[in-house]
Image (cartoon, rainbow, N blue to C red):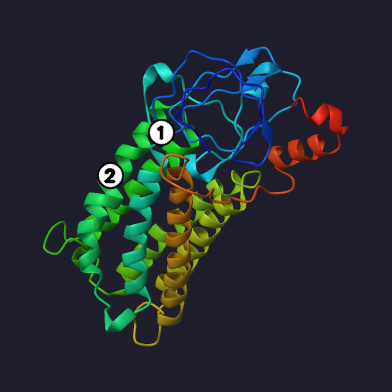
Amino acid sequence: MATSATMTPTTANYVGANGASVVPVPSSVDGSGPGQHQHQHHQHHLHSPTTYNDHDHDHGHDSHRHDRRRPAFGGEFQPGPYMAPSTARKFGNPAPLGLSAFALTTFILSLINMRTRGVVAPNIVVAAAFGYGGLVQLLAGMWEMAVGNTFGATALSSYAGFWISFAIILTPGGFQIAQALGGESSQFLNSFGFFLMGWFIFTTILLLCTLRSTVAFFTLFLWLDLAFLLLGAGYLNPGKNGAPRESLIKAGGFFGLLAAFTAWYNALAGLADSSNSFFVIPVAHFPWSDKAQSNRRVDDRPKSEKATV
């Protein structure tokens, strides 16, 4: 995790967020906020402090630029190794905000899809979809673009667009999209099923981009992908009463709940650091990920060589 204290000259080791021994080096640069840090590269380069969370780092690569890349981390909505943004921009990490906005709106709608406590009308989600899941998540997505995270910007901004368009469809007496398609007629059910299936395809594309990241990041998109698939199938295959098939809608709501809680988990991983938490949120890198392979290379080195990493 990150530390906000100024590093002073010392030869003592301390333990980083990933459990590796790190040798502090003298520096006159102050870490002024969560996620700002200094550490040694090849014992003669200093990593400049950043405003981001100081999670696991790769060591032992040939290229100095490659050494400074951070491993995939759902808390920053990064599916692969990436360079931290320049401190000159003074941006924080927008991912937890976007993840939280997505999680809460998905949580509400998924409970309604599961008919929790007999609630079946989704009108209450309109406010959250416009304000939090829509506007706030869109702002987070644009800030992801500003810090150079194309994946995060694409995902957060797109799902913000989903929530805004979903709210437009459900706005009572507003755009009258459902009424124009005949209300609960097959025309509307099939049209809405097409809409959901389109989001299933888009989410599958994002899911493929997380296969080399972390278990926490991958499962977020897996649950969401299954939710869109089941909800879309529920509208395209209505029951005998002409309404969306209840069993598929409930199943989609269940996976939507899993997606909501997984999004909150990734948001917590991005928020928790040494300034506000006593523990590190595990994210579980896949065995084939760059981070896991780097750890195996370090473990295979002689003990004398490990002490310098």
The answer to whether residue 176 of the structure is visible from this angle is: yes
Q: Amino acid at mark 1?
A: Glu
Q: Tag 2: Cα neighbours inside 10 Å, few (<14), some, or many (≥20)?
A: many
Q: Residue furthest right?
A: 302
Task: Tell me if 185 is positioned left or right of 194 in this view.
Answer: left
For the residue pair 270 and 149, the one nearer the viewer reads as 270
Q: Give how far across and how far down residue 105 sits, in percent.
A: 32, 59
Q: Distance between the Cα atoms at labels 2 and 1? A: 12 Å
Q: Give how far across and how far down residue 174 sits, in percent.
A: 13, 58
135 up-or-down from 263: above or below: above
Q: Which mark is residue 250?
A: none
23 up-or-down from 185: above or below: above
Residue carrying label 1: 144
Which image quarter is the C terminus in?
top right
Q: Residue furthest left?
A: 173
The structure residue drawn at horizontal position 74% and vertical position 24%, both measured from the top left corner, is: 61
238 up-or-down from 94: above or below: below
Q: Give how far across and how far down residue 292 sits, in percent.
A: 72, 42
Q: Residue furthest bottom?
A: 240
The structure residue drawn at horizontal position 43% and vertical position 65%, both measured from the top left corner, is: 256
Q: Which mark is residue 136?
A: 2
The reply to whether callout 2 and callout 1 are in contact (CB within 8 Å) is no
Q: Give how far across and how far down residue 182 sits, in percent.
A: 23, 70
Q: Secondary structure at mark 2?
A: helix
Q: Tag 1: Cα neighbours inside 10 Å, few (<14), some, or many (≥20)?
A: many
The structure residue drawn at horizontal position 48% and vertical position 50%, both measured from the top left corner, is: 266
Q: Amino acid at mark 2?
A: Val
The structure residue drawn at horizontal position 66% and vertical position 47%, both measured from the top left corner, is: 285
For the residue pair 120 and 240, the one nearer the viewer reads as 120
Q: Secondary structure at mark 1?
A: helix
Task: Tell me if 160 is positioned left or right of 270 in this view.
Answer: left
The answer to whether residue 158 of the structure is visible from this angle is: no
